[in-house]
Image (cartoon, helix red, strand yellow):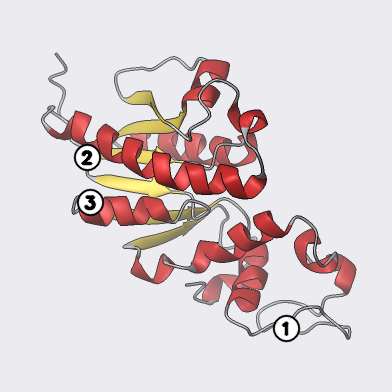
Amino acid sequence: MENKAYRGHVLALPFPIQGHINPLLQFSKHLVSKGLKATLATTRFIHNTMQPQSSSSLQFDTISDGYDEGGFAQAESIHASLNRMETIGSKTLADLIIKNKNTANPIDCIIYDPFLPWALEVAKKFGIFGAAFFTQTCTVNFIYHHVHHGLLKLPITSTPISIPGLPVLELDDMPSFISVPGSYPAYFEMVLNQFSSTDKADAVLVNTFYELEPEVGNYDIQ
């Protein structure tokens, strides 16, 4: 039985692709260095593929997206995959919280990828602190934020593009979902839905540092 006293237990929940898993994994390691216990929860398929090794302070656990055997390749469509992950992921995330509830280190905080906004609903259900962790830069998030809130109309019909806090941009400077209208509409919807509940999160974290993006870093992306 684990007897070590930690300052808290953080559950990190990334969107299940490498470019989103690695930033939260590195952040989890940073939290561990500050005296916290961290658990990184990936889908069962990703977990079985990666076969990560847990330590006493950094552990790996799983939720299900409904495609435990083959991952996304099993899904009928992108929409089906995202809908199934929300339904089954919510339930298995709750199960994971309950599993840790009566241990020496129950989960105190969920740091979730905003691609999975339903994770915040689960955190609130259990009275757990919920923090959104944006894996992309402030600049990219800020552009999507403007589209989500109707501040940047699509399709873009004139250039250059002026967005407060950013240099003047051309169409080729924009994220591909915006510069190529209609490309992967299900993923584009997911990208915009990142902001659907961040105003309810207890904290918003971004994978960047102020000196890299000082102007846009002064704006609220909720």
The first of marks 3 and 2 along the sequence is 2
The type of residue carrying mark 1 is: Lys
Mark 2 and mark 1 lie on one chain; the one further toward the N terminus is: 2
Examine the rendered structure and indicate whether residue 213 appears above or below residue 133: below
Q: Which of the two marks, 3 or 2, is nearer to us in this view? A: 3
For the point 54% across and 25% down, the residue is 46
- Please tell me whether mark 2 sits on a helix, a strand or a loop: loop
Q: Is residue 139 above or below residue 8?
A: below
Sequence-wise first label, 3 or 1 = 3
Within-10-Å neighbours for mark 2: few <14, some 14–19, many 20+: some
> Residue shown at 53%/77% (left/top)?
219
Q: Is residue 52 above or below residue 127?
A: above
Dot 3 falls on a residue whose secondary structure is loop
Q: Amino acid at mark 3?
A: Ile
Residue that carries the numbered disc 3 in the rendered image? 128
Query: Pointer 1: residues within 10 angstroms few (<14), some, or many (20+)?
Result: few
Q: Residues within 10 Å of mark 3 (few under 14, many from 20)?
A: some
Please state the horizontal and vertical placement of residue 218, each as a whole percent of the image: 53, 75
Q: Report whether 39 appears left or right of 139.
A: left
Q: Are marks 3 and 2 in contact (CB under 8 Å)?
A: no
Judged left or right of residue 122, residue 63 is: right
Q: Is residue 20 left or right of residue 172?
A: left
Q: Please give left or right for residue 88 compared with residue 207 in the image.
A: left
Q: Indicate which label's residue lies in the foreground, 3 or 1.
A: 1
Residue bearing mark 1: 153
Q: Which residue is mark 2?
A: 8
The image position of residue 27, as x and y in percent, is 46, 40
